[in-house]
């Protein structure tokens, strides 16, 4: 097992570049199953979730070549099986994205109950009801689903709740389905728009992404193509928050500022001094942090994946902050570890905590519960006094590429240690 050992309180200074978006790259790689032509995908982050998805693709018979760092050539010419390897798929929530393309190409797929971070309920019924709307027969066996169809048929499907993964899954199911599909109450995230834009370049007919109403006219096949993965807005926001919490001059480059408008609004309201340029953000130290309230919401609202880093920031702000997590009911339990570091956080209920600041944090022994809470603990350890040890860093590696090396380049004292 590996862990991070962090000596906190060090001055940070310099430039850090944002990698490709995990939540875009996973979906584009899964979409390669829609065609037997070759795709070249660049700016792919080198993270554990990507490695697991590539293992699943290779297990199906997909040819995957890593021609250079972050660049993959993929071709699903001969799909040899329609059963996803359960030991891998159970660890990866995004494995369900492969179901629609396999149904379109092969008429069948067997996949286990998907995994990912343990951050609350992610209802499977949305996916199963969606597949059934495309005339798919669903059989549930012990620990797995067996889906069958003679031919996917376009449909109208209304999502009972806004779900990013469900929206992407139904979009991928509709691309090769016969006829027109209408998706209502769809998620609007930039990663969905990027996926649709690339598919359209390859011959798909998708309209309306970025809005709650998506229309897909099914096509018979897709062509090959080249795609560059968009920047990771969650990673970008995490680095900016690190600069604000540490009050150090950190410049974050390679991001799309318009994807984080609510974060900029809240940082400005909290008194953070920063400058936004075309593809970068610079944190200017010397400001006084003020407490602000936060309520997560589906895009274009404040991203749930940035809630944990922002809560760390609020431990350094003067006053009381109400953090309201509206998406996942299990996503605030990491605050117990922040309290062990010296924070003053009261849990009102599973969806709300009250943060009283400012408080001085001290190094502690910590365990990363999930990807986003994990990076929040890294931020907390970097601004704390003394040494922190973070275990279970596989969770962090699932979403952040070589994070210790990149943070070291801006002055952080962080080491990866093997037991």
Image (cartoon, rainbow, N blue to C red):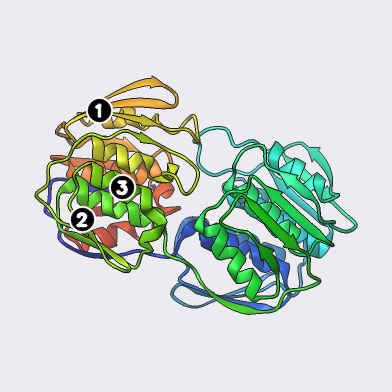
Q: Mark 1 points at which residue?
A: 340
Looking at the rendered structure, the number of numbered marks drawn on it comes to 3
Observer-nearest residue: 217 or 254?
217
Q: For the residues carrying marks 3 and 1, which lies nearer the camera in this image?
A: 3
Q: Which residue lies furthest to the left in this view?
A: 286
Separation (CA) of disc 2 from disc 1: 30 Å
Q: Do the residues labelled 3 and 1 touch (CB within 8 Å)?
A: no
**Mark 2 neighbour class, 10 Å CA radius: few under 14, some 14 to 19, many 20 or more:** many
Mark 2 secondary-structure assignment? strand
Report the disc number at residue 265: 3
Q: Are marks 2 and 1 in contact (CB under 8 Å)?
A: no
Is residue 385 rendered to the left or right of residue 196? left
The picture quadrant where one finds residue 108 is bottom right
Separation (CA) of disc 2 from disc 3: 11 Å
Mark 3 secondary-structure assignment? helix
Is residue 360 rendered to the left or right of residue 392? left
Q: Mark 2 points at which residue?
A: 274
Q: Which of marks 3 and 1 is nearer the N terminus?
A: 3
**Mark 1 neighbour class, 10 Å CA radius: few under 14, some 14 to 19, many 20 or more:** some
Q: Which of marks 2 and 3 is nearer the N terminus?
A: 3
Q: Position of residue 2 (x, y in %)?
A: 36, 49
Q: Relative to 248, is 406 above or below?
A: below
**Mark 3 neighbour class, 10 Å CA radius: few under 14, some 14 to 19, many 20 or more:** few
Residue at the image position 71 percent from the left and 58 percent from the top: 215
Report the disc number at residue 326: none
Q: Which of marks 2 and 1 is nearer the N terminus?
A: 2
Q: Which residue lies furthest to the right in this view?
A: 150
Residue at the image position 19 percent from the left and 48 percent from the top: 272
Residue at the image position 48 percent from the left and 68 percent from the top: 44
Q: Position of residue 7 (x, y in %)?
A: 17, 47
Mark 1 secondary-structure assignment? helix
Q: For the residues carrying marks 2 and 3, which lies nearer the camera in this image?
A: 3
């Amino acid at each position: 097992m590996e862990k991070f050992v962090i000596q906190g309180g060090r001055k940070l200074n310099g430039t850090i570049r944002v990698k490709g978006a995990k939540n875009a790259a996973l979906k584009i790689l899964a979409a390669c199953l829609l065609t037997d032509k070759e795709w070249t995908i660049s700016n792919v982050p080198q993270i554990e979730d990507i490695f697991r998805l590539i293992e699943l693709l290779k297990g199906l018979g997909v040819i995957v070549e890593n021609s250079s760092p972050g660049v993959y050539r993929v071709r699903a010419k001969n799909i040899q099986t329609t059963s996803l390897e359960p030991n891998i798929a159970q660890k990866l929530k995004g494995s369900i994205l492969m179901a629609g393309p396999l149904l379109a190409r092969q008429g069948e797929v067997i996949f286990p109950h998907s995994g990912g971070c343990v951050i609350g309920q992610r209802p499977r019924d949305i996916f199963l009801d969606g597949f059934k709307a495309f005339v798919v027969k669903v059989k549930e066996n012990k620990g797995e689903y067996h889906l069958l169809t003679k031919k996917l048929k376009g449909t109208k499907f209304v999502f009972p709740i806004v779900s990013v993964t469900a929206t992407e899954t139904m979009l991928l199911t509709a691309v090769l389905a016969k006829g027109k599909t209408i998706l209502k109450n769809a998620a609007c995230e930039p990663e969905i728009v990027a996926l649709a834009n690339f598919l359209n370049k390859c011959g798909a007919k998708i309209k309306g992404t970025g809005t709650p109403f998506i229309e897909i006219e099914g096509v018979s096949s897709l062509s090959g193509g080249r795609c560059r993965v968009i920047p990771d807005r969650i990673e970008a926001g995490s680095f900016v928050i690190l600069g604000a919490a540490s009050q150090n001059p950190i410049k974050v480059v390679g991001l799309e500022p318009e994807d984080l408008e609510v974060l900029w609004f809240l940082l400005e309201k909290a008194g953070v001094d920063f400058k936004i340029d075309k593809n970068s953000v610079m944190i200017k130290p010397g400001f006084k942090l003020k407490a602000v309230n936060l309520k997560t919401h589906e895009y274009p609202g404040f991203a749930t994946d940035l809630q944990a880093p922002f809560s760390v920031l609020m431990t350094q702000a003067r006053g009381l902050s109400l953090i309201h997590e509206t998406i996942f009911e299990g996503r605030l339990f990491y605050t117990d570890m922040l309290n062990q570091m010296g924070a003053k956080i009261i849990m009102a209920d599973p969806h709300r905590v009250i943060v009283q600041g400012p408080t001085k944090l001290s190094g502690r022994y910590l365990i990363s519960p999930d990807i986003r809470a994990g990076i929040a603990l890294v931020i907390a350890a970097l601004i704390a006094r003394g040494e922190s040890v973070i275990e279970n860093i596989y969770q962090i590696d699932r979403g952040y590429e070589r994070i210790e090396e990149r943070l070291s380049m801006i002055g952080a004292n962080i080491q990866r240690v093997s037991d």
